[in-house]
Amino acid sequence: MSDALLAGYDAVLFDLDGTVYHGAQVIEGAPETVAAVRSQGTAVRFVTNNASKSPEDVVAHLRGLGLSAEVAEVHTSAQAAVAVLGESLAKGAEVLVVGTASLANAVAAAGLTPVRRASAAVAAVVQGHSPDNAWADLAEACLAIRAGALWVACNVDATLPSERGLLPGNGSMVAALRTATDTEPVVAGKPQPLLFETAARSERALVVGDRLDTDIAGAVAAGLDVLCVLTGVATPASVLRAVPAERPTHLGADLTALTLPADELRIGPRPSWEISEGNVLTVRGEGAPLDLLRALCAAAWRTEVTTVRAEGDAAGAALTGLGLA
């Protein structure tokens, strides 16, 4: 495995939702791939924007899905949000929590006072995902934010991958408060680089994620290489149209790509596919559809042209398979 993508890094930083699992369903190949990373002596980190679970709960969930994990390997947006609060507030300051009990416990562990109702004493609002967040919670946060409280959002993911499909994420609830308060929150999690910088430490790290606007954007902001997988939010069409701040260095179908040669996964031209540039990207050749997507991304990102067409049945079938026909 000396030429495998994972061999070039000291640590691999895994996103969870949409990359390792969909809710209670593990993504095929994830346990074996994480085990392969460990067997190479490469450090494993789990970096998640989901603030609904404590690191201990994340570990229990991963182990229940057949993956080995330790609490020290888990880095959550809740931890990042509490770090922001700790830097901004005096010890004992009241923080209105919109989120799970584990988020409130993290606030308390930082020497701050978690509350659930707005008052003149509330210095900050911290908002993280919880399936139990309701209008009443947003109403209390709205009052506190309008009164001048610091507003920290654990993340702004609009959707949350699940075994049933995409569900409303914390970002959707943040959007409601943004509209109600005409205020922008401080965002602690991805795409801000803090989570990745903390998890990577001083190691040469590779980020693996499924979402362009958080996983990939956060990695780019932190100056880290990133493998985008297509098991969650990102699609071939969205990767092709990615803005510069959201462009991965490598592209794979799923986590098992980590064990493939790095050169096969890197965004760039492919000998099996010819792409003529102009007002339209014209595709000729025959080969793996994902190889075509890697080559198309290189051309589209360089030229800013994202309209494609095929010449020949093989090229047409490949574009159709990618949803780009």
Image (cartoon, rainbow, N blue to C red):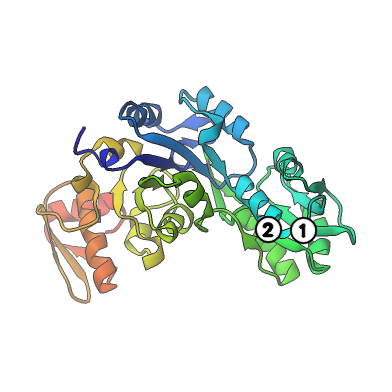
Q: Nearer the viewer, residue 316 or 258?
A: 258
What residue lies at 16% left-to-right and 55% top-to-bottom?
315
Question: Is mark 2 in CB contact (under 8 Å) with mark 1?
Answer: yes
Label 1 Cα crowd, 10 Å radius (few <14 / some 14-19 / many 20+):
many
Considering only order in the chain, which callout, 1 or 2, is on the residue closer to the N terminus? 1
Query: Foreground: 258 or 72?
Result: 72
User: Residue under circle 2?
Assistant: 152
Is 79 rendered above or below residue 302? Answer: above
Residue 254 sits above or below residue 185 on the image: above
16 left or right, relative to 142: left
Tag on residue 140? Answer: none
- Quadrant including the N terminus: top left
State left or right for residue 302 relative to residue 114. Answer: left
The answer, for residue 75, to whether it is visible in the render is: yes
The residue lying toward the viewer, choosing from 174 and 113, is 113
Q: Residue at x 58, y 26 (%)?
A: 60
Would you say 230 lies left or right of 49 here?
Answer: left
Expressed as whole percent of the image width and height from the top left, the position of residue 182 reads 71, 72
The amino acid type found where label 2 is placed reads Val
Which residue is label 1 attached to? 124
Asked if residue 16 can be seen in this view, the reply is no
Amino acid type, label 1: Ala
Q: Secondary structure at mark 2?
A: strand
Q: Secondary structure at mark 1?
A: strand
Q: CA distance from mark 2 to mark 1?
A: 7 Å
* Label 2: how many Cα within 10 Å (few below 14, some 14–19, many 20+): many
Q: At 38% across and 40% down in the image, what residue appears?
A: 11
Q: Position of residue 169 (x, y in %)?
A: 60, 50
